[in-house]
Amino acid sequence: MKPPAASPTATSTKRQTSLAGFFTPAGSAKKSRTEAAPRPVGRDDDDEPVAIAGPSSGTKRKLGSAEDSAVVRNIGVEEETPEERPSPTDEDTFINYPPRTHPSYRLPPRPDYNHPIPIMPPPPSLISSLRFNTSPRIITSPADLDLLYFNRFIDPSGARQLTKYLLEAMPWYRVNYRTRMGQDIKTPRYTTVFGKDATPLPWDQYPKWSPRAIPEILLRLMQKVEQVTGETYNFSLVNYYSSGTDSISYHSDSERFLGPNPCIASISLGAPRDFFLRHTEHKTNGLPVQKFNLHDGDMVVMRGKTQHKWEHSIPKRAKAEGRINITFRKGVVQYATENYLTYNVGTGPMFRWEGGKMVEKGYVG
Ligand SMILES: O=C(O)CCC(=O)C(=O)O
Ligand SMILES: [Fe+2]
């Protein structure tokens, strides 16, 4: 089991590069959205099958299942002690940590490359408000589990501002797709994705989808997460669960395009939600479901064998307020870009958060 990365050192300061002048006014590269229905691979069974028209199919997950009513191990609401939460140093903020270029993140032609809408820059007050808890709890049992859990990785005040900013700034999608078996799937949450795989293929030479540049605030967060996890990333997938009926069913992010033993960092913002993990052989080995209640600002890092031996989910709930989830991952081959855009942007309409709700904006980009 790999220990968490050592605390920040002076070398991280040396690697800083200023992005002053790097961010230019938006002028988004448009891409035709008239492609055929996405090829049903990769995330087919991530989401619950729901009849796209007409009444819900019988396979839709029921609320209040036995699993749902189980006691949740509330590790996310643990009281903080001053020992665990020292005052942040400058290294725990962005103050001395502007975005830098990392080998895993290939610079886009422009920072707003292939954005279907201009992404408003994060207010300086948001950037300066972000404070981080860089001391994780390491969880390596039961068998094959390898997690880092950062209780309130992002402090509440920064997390609140970040949630508001992301809701308003991101293009959001609710992706529909047809599986290989011909089943219509309606993704039960809003999604969006940024980033490009680690191959040297130029940004404009993707046959189906051009990758989207990672927006400034997500890039800053990604680089902070790289610092505290000792891993590198090049994709950010963002989910928005607008209510308790939005969810992600049991799945593992063990796609081959992420390489062996992928490390996935996952930040929660907004309302709490249960996060369940079950062993892939739980029916024979009897390992219990691991239950977390993830809170605003928490971060879970899944690494080692976790993606191969465990599945995770955000189950539906009778009542839940809005929650954003940001994940960082590293795609190693070109197909990662195609898959992520297909299943997190897709060919359907875009939504924007306006006046406290999601408003459909039609086909943009
Ligand atoms: O919302 C979460 O915490 C989990 C999201 C997730 O598993 C995914 O996007 O693959
Ligand atoms: Fe996942």
Image: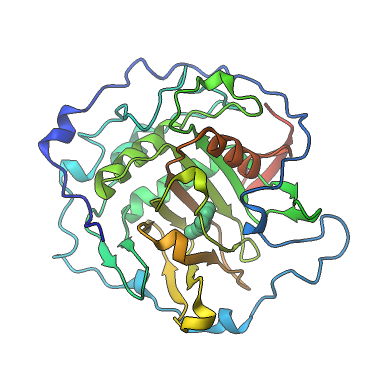
The residue at the far right in this view is 54
Task: Out of 94 and 365, give the one closest to the viewer.
Answer: 365
Percent x, y of residue 115:
57, 27
Q: Nearer the viewer, residue 117 or 343?
A: 343
Q: Quadrant of residue 353?
A: top right
Q: Position of residue 317 (x, y in %)?
A: 60, 71
Asked whether, in this view, residue 250 is left or right of residue 22, the answer is right
Res. 169 visible in picture = no
Quadrant in which the N terminus appears: bottom left
In which quadrant will I find the C terminus? top right
**279, above or below 165, in the image:** below
Q: Is residue 171 left or right of residue 146?
A: right
x, y (%) of residue 168? 55, 40
Quadrant position of residue 223: top left
> Which of the 4 image quarters holds residue 83?
bottom left
159 up-or-down from 18: above or below: below
Residue 232 location in percent, x, y? Answer: 33, 40
Using the image, determine if residue 345 lies above or below residue 79.
above
Q: Is residue 197 left or right of residue 143?
A: right
Residue placed at 61% from the left, 43% from the top?
344
Residue placed at 47% from the left, 84% from the top?
Answer: 286
- Count of number-bearing discs: 0
Left or right for 281, reference 316: left
Q: Residue furthest left?
A: 10
